[in-house]
Amino acid sequence: MRVLIFETSELAVDRVVRAVVEQIERKPASILGLATGGTMEPVYDGLSAAYRSGSVSLAGVTSFNLDEYVGLSPEHSCSFAAFMREKLFDRTDMRSNRANLPVGNAVDPDAEAARYDALISELGPIDLQLLGIGANGHIGFNEPTSSLRSRTRVKTLTRATLEANKRFFADGETPPKYAITVGIQNILEAKSILLLATGSAKAKAVATMIEGPLGSYCPATALQMHADTTIVLDREAAAELTLTDYYSQVHPDGQDAPYG
Ligand code: PGA
């Protein structure tokens, strides 16, 4: 794991935006794995700004989002499909027919999960998988005790996740209890992984992910088994790490240190 610690969340976000732009520059037809959530909003703001300034085009990109709520149509304002349109797709030249998410209101959610899994296998592997992390250590909606070999399927969301995501729903509206999510095995099949965590609410999960024992109790620990994972943190999210000195020695201020 490459652990990059930045003084501020803005610097951490900039690093992630730069990595995505560089990936698309290297390979305009990149396959990106995309995430939703509050942490990703400034990343998509940054990518949209890079598009507006002419530094990047998403016209050749194919994307696969991690997850979608069961029961919500892509048109529902609280769906992840709507989030992605609003935050990224409609603000760039991303082609809608290449932007994939599980269909939340499919008649048969299990069949939809299988269709989505097969599509990723057919078009993949994903070149760069963007991830956030839940305060409970989830990646995607792979809640604690998810199999570390899991593939796309329907998951029951924990009460903690429902509580954390309530803010995206209107007052009185109940967030769906189930989601279709890619599995941990799908995530591990990406060629490279870039996880962003900011703020003190993530500090405990981040420390377990990086330094804790591998186990499904903290699903993000599975990333320890991936050979090309970069974890981008701000100072607050890094606060509970034990080996901070070492990470700063290897990557002072989140930069690559020259040998010697
Ligand atoms: P957040 O969600 O960015 O809204 O904190 C992250 C996640 O649950 O993966």
Image (cartoon, helix red, strand yellow):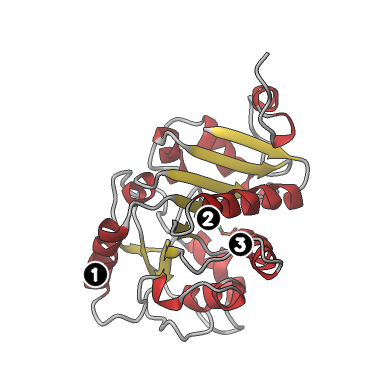
- Above/below status of 170 relative to 100: below
The residue identified by callout 2 is 24
Marks 3 and 2, how far apart at CA: 7 Å
Label 1 amino acid?
Asp
Of the image marks 2 and 1, the number of the one nearer the N terminus? 2
Whether disc 2's CB lies below 8 Å from ligand 1 is answered: no
Tell me the distance, in whole angstroms, between the alpha carbons under discs 2 and 1: 33 Å
Q: Which tag, 1 or 3, sits closer to the chain's start?
A: 3
Residue highlighted by disc 1? 110
Residue depicted at x 35% and y 50%: 146
Q: Whole-percent x and y of residue 205?
A: 56, 43
| Disc 3 and disc 2 in contact, CB within 8 angstroms | yes
Mark 2 packing: few (<14 Cα in 10 Å), some, or many (20+)?
many
Q: Quadrant of ligand 1?
A: bottom right
Task: Name the image quarter holding residue 152.
Answer: bottom left
Residue occupying the point 39% across, 34% down: 225
Mark 1: few, some, or many residues within 10 Å (few <14, many ≥20)? Answer: some
Q: Camera-side residue: 227 or 157?
A: 227
Which sits earlier in the primary sequence, circle 3 or circle 2? 2
Query: 64 or 56, which lies in front?
Result: 56
| Residue 56 at x, y percent in the picture | 61, 62
Q: Closer to the camera: disc 1 or disc 3? A: 3
Label 2 residue SS: helix
State the mark number for residue 56.
3
Pick whichever, 181 or 258, lies toward us. Answer: 258
Q: Which of the image's four quarters has the C terminus? A: top right
- The residue positioned 34% from the left and 62% from the top of the image is 155
Q: Amino acid at mark 3?
A: Val
Q: Label 1 to label 3, Cα distance in Å?
A: 36 Å
Q: Position of residue 173 (x, y in %)?
A: 53, 83
Q: Residues within 10 Å of mark 3 (few under 14, many from 20)?
A: many
Q: Is residue 7 left or right of residue 145?
A: right
